[in-house]
Amino acid sequence: MIHPCQTGVRDPNAADGTRILVNRLWPRGLSKERAKINYWAKTIAPSAELRQWYGHDPEKWEQFTAKYAAELDSNAESITELLVHFNDKHVTLLFSSREARLNNVYALKEYLEASRSV
């Protein structure tokens, strides 16, 4: 089961399972010790161009998810590397966006579930 979670919102706990950060940049103000990240999936995060274009505009959400899915489709190596870390029953995908729902982690979760990768 995949659980999206915003970094810094709560402390890590045992129920998180494998903790995977899906950001190209490390979240500002978050120490690696406190974050307790098992894997940093920076190569699976959306491109800078896509993030800047999207800008967390809710009206662009569907276009964003389609464009991000196209990026993921062309990044099979990173998807395979990511899935290696899904050996636990629970995986927590972490993000640092202020947008709590319309962000890359939710788009990635939908992509993985739709492709039946998880």
Image (spheres, rainbow, N blue to C red):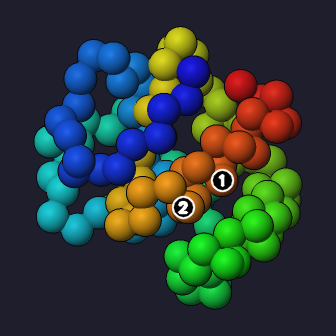
What residue sits right under mark 1 in the picture? 107
Amino acid type, residue under disc 2 in the picture: Asn
Relative to the observer, which residue lies in front, 55 or 45? Answer: 55
Query: Residue at point 15% right, 52% down?
Result: 31
Relative to residue 83, is residue 63 drawn left or right? right
Residue 104 lies in what quarter of the image? Answer: bottom right
* Residue 42 in view here: no
- Are circles 2 and 1 on residues that touch, CB within 8 Å? yes
Residue 57: percent from left, percent from top: 58, 80
Residue 103: percent from left, percent from top: 54, 61
Using the image, determine if residue 57 lies above or below residue 19: below
Image quadrant occupied by the N terminus:
top right
Total numbered labels placed on residues in the image: 2
* Residue 49 in view here: yes
Say the numbered circle drawn on residue 32: none
Residue 50: percent from left, percent from top: 66, 79
Say the numbered circle drawn on residue 103: 2
Using the image, determine if residue 103 lies above or below residue 91: below
Using the image, determine if residue 111 lies above or below residue 68: above
* Cα–Cα span, label 2 and label 1: 6 Å
